[in-house]
Image (cartoon, helix red, strand yellow):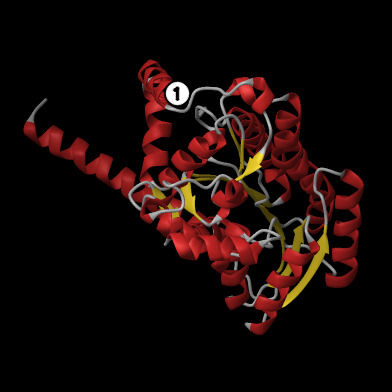
Amino acid sequence: MKSDDRRNTLALAMLGAGAAFFLWSLRRKARRIDFLGKTVVIVGGSRGLGLEIARQLVKEGARLVLLARRPDELERARAELARSGGDVITFPCDVGVRQQVEEAVAATIELRGRIDVLINVAGVIQVAPFENLELKDFQESMDVHAWGPYHMMRAVAPHMQRRKSGRIVNVSSIGGLVAVPHLLAYTMGKFALTGLSDGFRAELAKDGIYVTTVAPGLMRTGSHINANFKGQHKKEFAWFAISGANPALSTAAPAAARKIIEACRYGQARLIINWPARLLHAANALLPEVTSFATGVAARMLPAPAAAADNEQHPGWDSRSRLAPSLLTRPSDRAIEANNEQPADSGYVAAAYRRRQ
């Protein structure tokens, strides 16, 4: 090819790329929404990542509806957001129970008149080798991560379809794209949510409803003390808490919340949060054999299964050891009280963490 031809080909390619980018920018801008005055339902909005999303949406003037299982946590979250000027109502709701979901959605529409945005954040984490997991652990994960969002979307979608607009955000996990050792029940639920969310996106596009699937990597939300551990639960808690606290591997809750809100604002199809998660996803897609080998090695390095007789479930705050809490977990520990993650005996737990820090 002559040099002039090469230059012309390169110029045409650059022109085509520029035109494509221009059209993409216009389309993205057309999707943009503001949250001022919008009714936003946050499932799991009483603590952790859901609460941080609520805080940021309050600053944008959204009218919030928070759903969670525990009334005391909901009230603490409502009081905090109200002090910041937030317009917030709450409903205790187990999203794994269809009737409770339908009642909460009906009450929301009655009080607010509409639902503009639905954000499914609620989650439960079970950490253990598969030998120490039971059927009920898998069922709980599916109820919270898959059936809960299904019930919510099924109840909210017809309302959005009638208005030909709406936004839905489903917070899955990198564990819903790549299987992670000792998180098998969690992975099962999150994989189901990823497929469900992507499927709803395709089905609802015709109605002007944009569905965003979020796959965060590790985050520093303080939720590690409310995760559930089995087997050698103190060792399981230690590796999980230390990994999640590492700033090089994890994302702070405010930063993750900002990214999720922006993805919702522009109707983004998928958001993978932080570079380790993006790298893991790319490696699994391009080099599955290498990823399989690496996760197999990781599984061998994690704590061995415990005897079946020691198959009791322990929350993180009941799995303390000399490694956790410690300096290695401090970045995540700081988020516990800030994000309303303290459990029922919060006075004792907060004191214990302060002493160890």
Name the residue located 56 percent from the left edge and 64 percent from the top edge. 350
Q: Toward the viewer: 301 or 173?
A: 301
Q: Position of residue 5 (x, y in %)?
A: 14, 33
Q: Position of residue 353 (x, y in %)?
A: 50, 60
Q: Is 52 rendered above or below residue 43?
A: below
- Residue 258 visible in rendering: no
Q: Is 137 rendered above or below residue 37?
A: above
Name the residue located 76 percent from the left edge and 71 percent from the top edge. 75
For the C terminus, which image quadrant?
A: bottom left
Name the residue located 64 percent from the left edge and 61 percent from the top edge. 47
Quarter where residue 288 is shown? top left
Q: Helix or strand or loop: what does disc 1 sit on?
A: helix
Q: Toward the viewer: 344 or 20?
A: 344
- Residue 146 visible in rendering: yes
Extreme left residue here?
Answer: 3
Mark 1 surroundings: few (<14), some (14-19) or many (≥20) residues within 10 A:
some
Q: Position of residue 269 (x, y in %)?
A: 55, 45
Q: How many marks?
A: 1
Q: Amino acid at mark 1?
A: Ala
Quarter where residue 265 is shown? bottom right
Judge left or right: residue 18 versus residue 353: left
Q: Position of residue 60 (x, y in %)?
A: 59, 75
The residue that mark 1 highlights is 299
Q: Toward the viewer: 250 or 356?
A: 356
For the N terminus, which image quadrant?
A: top left
Judge left or right: residue 323 versus residue 44: left
Quarter where residue 56 is shown? bottom right
Q: Is 8 rendered above or below residue 121?
A: above
